[in-house]
Image (cartoon, helix red, strand yellow):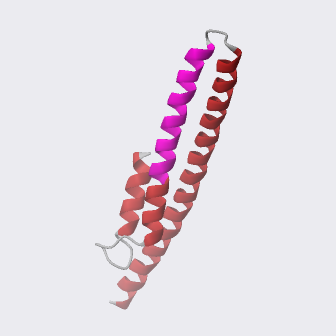
Amino acid sequence: MRKLILAVLLIAACGPSATQIDKTTETHFWGLRLATESLANAKRSCELSSEMASQNNPRSIEDRDRACSKWRDADKSLRDKQAEIETYCRERLDSCERVKRLQAMAR
């Protein structure tokens, strides 16, 4: 996870200005952060619901099933967001490398 965050921030350095993060990079960064927080919250909810369900209360079991389903959904959402960011990072880094090569050839 830290590698992805670092990659997103490093990509900003290849943007229009080294001190300016473009909107797409910023959107990806915050999307990743929200997806990570959502996953952590869903996991806690599943764990708490599982403790309650251990008392064999039918309602608690249903609550656990719903909470753990949300956890699986949040996990998939985070993996999808990571894949999206990795693709974006690769494209930006490739683009940055092309620009650097062209700048070097122009010198």
Of residue 99 and residue 54, the one placed in the foreground of this image is 54
Question: Magenta part mainly helix, strand or loop?
Answer: helix
Residue 85 on the magenta segment: no
Q: Which residues are magenta?
A: 32-53
Residue 47 on the magenta segment: yes
Q: How many marks?
A: 0
Residue 47 place in picture, x, y as percent? 54, 23
Q: Residue at x 34, y 69 (%)?
A: 13
Residue 70 place in picture, x, y as percent? 63, 37
Residue with the most extreme left position: 19
**Above or below — where is 71 with respect to 87?**
above
**Above or below — where is 73 with respect to 11?**
above
Q: Residue at x 54, y 29 (%)?
A: 45
Q: Residue at x 67, y 10 (%)?
A: 56
Instruction: Locate residue 53: give its quadrant.
Output: top right
Instruction: Locate residue 50: give its quadrant.
Output: top right
